[in-house]
Image (spheres, coloured by chain):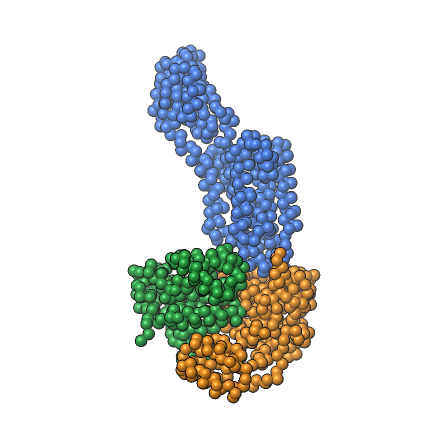
Chain colours: A green, B orange, C blue
Amino acid sequence: MREIVIKTENLSKRFGTFTAVNEINFEVYKGEIFGFLGANGAGKTTAMRMLCGLSTPSSGSATIAGFDIFRDTDKIKKNIGYMSQKFSLYENLTVLENIHFFGGIYGLSNQQLKEKSEVLVNKLGLYQEVNKLVSSLPLGWKQKLSFSVAILHEPKIVFLDEPTGGVDPVTRRQFWDLIYEASDSGMTIFVTTHYMDEAEYCNRICIMVDGSISALDSAPNLKLKFKANSMDEVFYALARGAKRGE
Amino acid sequence: MPMLDINDNIKWTSEKEMNPSLMVNAALSAEISIQVKNLVKVYGKDKTIAVDDVSFNVGKGELFGLIGPDGAGKTSIFRMLTTLLLPEGGSATVNGNDVVKDYKKIRKSVGYMPGKFSLYQDLSIEENLNFFATIFGTTLEENYDLIRDIYIQIEPFKKRRAGKLSGGMKQKLALCCALIHKPTVLFLDEPTTGVDPVSRREFWEMLKRLKAQNITILVSTPYMDEANMCDRIALIQKGKILSIDTPAEIINAYPDILYKIKADNIYHLYLHLNEFQYTKSCFAFGEMLHVSFTKNMEEVQSELLNYLNQRGHQNVSMDLVIPTIEDCFIKLLSN
Amino acid sequence: MKQLFVFIKKEFAHVLRDRKTLLILFGLPIVQILIFGFALTNEVKNSKIVIFDQAKDVSSLKLISKIETSRYFEIDKMLQHNQEVEEAFKTGKIKMAVIFPENFNHDLLHTNKATIQIISDATDPNTATMLNNYVTAIIGDYQAQLNKNFEVPYRIVPEVKMLYNPQLKGVHNFVPGVMAMVLMLVCVMMTAISIVREKETGTMEVLLVSPFKPLLVIVAKTIPYLILSLMNIVIILILSVFVLELPVNGNLFLLFAESTLFIITSLSLGMFISIQTETQQTAMLISLVGMFLPTLLLSGFMFPIENMPKPLQIVSNIVPAKWFYIIIKSIMIKGLGFAAIWKQTFILAGITTFFILISIKKFKIRLA
C-alpha cells in the first residue's frame, strides 16, 4: 500500500447558494504526479485553494501531508510548495535575490541558502545569470527557476497552477524533467491545468466538471474507458455537458 | 498500430532552401491574399529582433497557422500585417495593398482579433456587436448570414454583459465582432489561448465553416496539436520560420523513425534511454517516451532489450508512432 | 456621423454602468461643496467672544444677556479698556468683539438711533460671516421688541468690521475653486483614463484596425465628459445658490460659456495625457500630480498667489485653473461682464488650442 499524502472526504465549498466544490473524494500518493483538470469555473482553483490552506472548506474533511486542513493550516503551509504561472518570482529582483527571498520565507538558514542556491544555479545552468534581473530571463527559464524555488524547502507536496503555458516543446520538456526528478525523489506533484497535453504527463488525472469529480484514473485507462485517442477527447466527452461557465 | 510509410529519402526541407514563391499550395486558389517578404521587426534601444526575415504567402480562402511559443514573434507579424506596426525591413501586402502605404484600405477590409482582445466588459453582447457593426459602417442584420452560426450560440445571453461571460463565449463574441463587416481576410492572434478544450474544439470548427465561405484566415497558436486544423502552417521560433508546409507534409518530412516506449518507471526509463549508446533522441511525450535511434531497429532491438532488462525495467512496451507536429518542432529546434 | 453617435452612446454606457466612476463624477462635487460649505460652519456653536460695554445701561445689559443666552456665543471676558480688544484677538481664541458705545441707551431713546461696533476675526471668513449674521439677528430681535411698544421706530445700527481679511477672501471663493477642481478631475483624469483603458484592454487595437478615424476615437471619448461636466456645473451652482445661499451675481450665460471653454481646456489636457501614456495607472498619476495638485495649490483658490514667491507666481500663469478661477470669481461674485475677463478668456483659449494641436500632432495611427 502506497503512502497517502492527500486525502479528501466529501470536501465542499459553498459561496452563498453556489456550490463551487461539491463533496469531492480522492487520494493522492507519495511521489505521484497528480493532474487536476477542469474547464474554467469547474471548481479546480477553489479546490486547490482549500488544499493549500488558503480557503476554509464549508464541509467535509481533508488531510494534507498528514495535517488537517481545518486545524493545521500553518503546518500545511510549511510542508507544501506553490507555483503559479501568474505569479511566482519577483521580476525586479535578481535570480539570486529571488532564491534567497523565497528560501528565507521558509526559514532556511544562511548556510542552507548558500548551499542550495549553488546547487540550484548549477543544475539549471544559470551561472551567468545569477545577478541578472528575473525580468530579463526567457519565459522557459523563469518557469524552471520558479519551480526550483518552490521546492527549495523540500516540501512534501508541490502545487503547480498551469505551470507551462506558452513555451516551446523543448523548454517544456526540460521543465517536466525537473518535475519527474522531484517526483522520483518522493515529492508529490499536484498540477492543475486545462491543457490536455500537459495532463498526459501526469500519473493519474482527475477531471472536475461543475464542481464534482467526473473521472479519476491514469491517462491510458481514461482513454480506454472513453474510447478516445487523446486526453482532449476524454475531456471533451466529459465537459461537453457542463452547465457552468456559460 | 498503423503501419508506417516513412520513406527515408524524403527531403528534410531546411530553412534556407525554402522559397516563398513556391509555397503557395497548388491545390488552393492561386490568388494570394497575404504576401510577406523578408519582413523584419526590431524593438527598442537594444535592437531586439522580434521578427527575423520572415517570408510566406497565404492563398485566398486558406486557413494558415503560425505555430510557435510565446515570444516567437507571432504577435509582431500580426500587428505589422494589420498595419498597427511598421516593419524595419521587408514588405508585406494584404489583398494586394501594401501594409505601410495602403493602410487605410487594409483597415477597411480585414477583421482582426488581437491576443488580449477583451471586448467592452460593461457592454452586453448585443451592444458590443452593434457598436462594432456601426464602427465598421455596417449593421448586424446586413452580414448576419456570416455570423449566424456563431451568434445563435450566444444569442440567448445577448443581454448579458461581456464581463460576465465565460472564456469560450467571450471568444465567440470576439469572433463575431471581427466578422461583422464581412472581412475578406481574418487575423486571429492566439484566439484559443486560455480557453478550455471544449471551447477550443468548437472554435476550430467555426473557423472551418468560415473558410468554406472563402475567407482567408491567418491564425496563431502556441498549441502544436492545433496545427492539424490548418491547411498550411509555419512553425516559428525566435522570430524565424523553421518550416512552412501542410501539416501532413511536415510530418512526412520527419527524417527519423520514431518509437513510443514505456515502462513502469517512466522517469528511470527516460534517464537510461538517454544514456543508451544508439539513442538519437529521447524525450517525454505524455505518458510515453518518443525515441529515435541511430541504427535500424533490427540492429539495436536485442541490445536495447538487454540494456533495459539489466536496469530492471518492467513491462517495457515499444511501438512505432507517427510523429506529431510537436515532434517535428522539437526536431527542427534541435537542428 | 452615426459612428460618432454610437461611440458616444457607448461612452455613456461605460460611465453610467460603473458605480465608482459615477460616484467620483457626481458624489465628489456634492461632497466637496457640502464639506466646504458646512464643515466650516460647525464650529460656530459656543464661539468665544469678548464684550466691551462702555455704556453699562439698561439696553446694553439686556442685549448682552441675550447674546449670552444664545447657543452660538460664549462670553469669554468683559473688557474694561479699548486696548484689550486687540489683545484679545491676538490670543486667537476670540472670534468676535461686541463694543457698546457710551450713552448707548441714551442715544437710542433720544435720537432713536444707536450703533454697536462688531469686530470679527475674518481669518476664517466663513465663521466670521455666520457669527455676524447671528449677532445681527439678535440685535434685530431686540430692536423689534422695543418697537412693539413705541410708535417711533428705534434703530440699532451694527457697524461691522472684519479684522485681518476685510474682503472675506475664502467664503465665496470655494465655489469657483471647487468648480475648477471638479472639472479638472472629471475632464482630465476621467478622459485620460477612459482612453488609456482601451489601450490596455486591446480594444484600441481593434478600433485602429477599422475604418473609424482614429482621431475621432478621442473626440468621441471627450464629448460625454463635456456633457457630464456641464451637468456638474449645474449641480454645483444649484447647491451653492440654494443650500449655501451664495447668489450668482453675473450673467449665467457668460458663466456657462466660460465653463465650457475651461472644460474643453481640461479635455485637451486629458487627451494629451492619454496619448502619451500606456497604462491607466500612469495616466491617473500624471493627472493627479501634473494637473490636480497645481490646480489645488497654484490657482489661488487655497493660497493667495500674491503671497507666493516670485518663481511660483510665474509658474502659476500656466495653470489653466488660475485663469478660470479669476473668470468665475469675476462673474459669480463681482458680477462683472465679459469686458473684465476677456484677457483671461483669451489666455485659456490659447492654452486649449496649444494642447489640441500637439495632441493631434502626437496622435499615433499605429501602435508604438
On the rendered structure, is B98 left or right of C200?
A: right
Instruction: Please tell me whether residue B329 is drawn above or below residue A124 in the rendered image.
Output: below
- From where the camera sits, is residue C102 visible? yes
Q: Position of residue B53 (x, y in %)?
A: 65, 67
On the rendered structure, is C19 left or right of A54?
A: right
**Considering depth in this image, is C65 or B9 the residue closer to the camera?**
B9
Quadrant assignment, res C206: bottom right
Q: Tell me the residue at 43%/16% (across/down).
A: C83
On the rendered structure, is B190 left or right of C80?
A: right
Q: Position of residue A32 (x, y in %)?
A: 38, 72
**Considering depth in this image, is A87 or B107 the residue closer to the camera?**
A87
**Considering depth in this image, is B155 or B273 the residue closer to the camera?**
B273
On the rendered structure, is B312 left or right of B34?
A: left
- From where the camera sits, is residue A230 visible? no
Q: Position of residue C17 (x, y in %)?
A: 48, 53
Quadrant assignment, res C214: bottom right
Instruction: Please tell me whether residue B314 is drawn above or below residue A8 in the rendered image.
Output: below
Q: Tell me the residue at 35%/18% (across/down).
A: C62
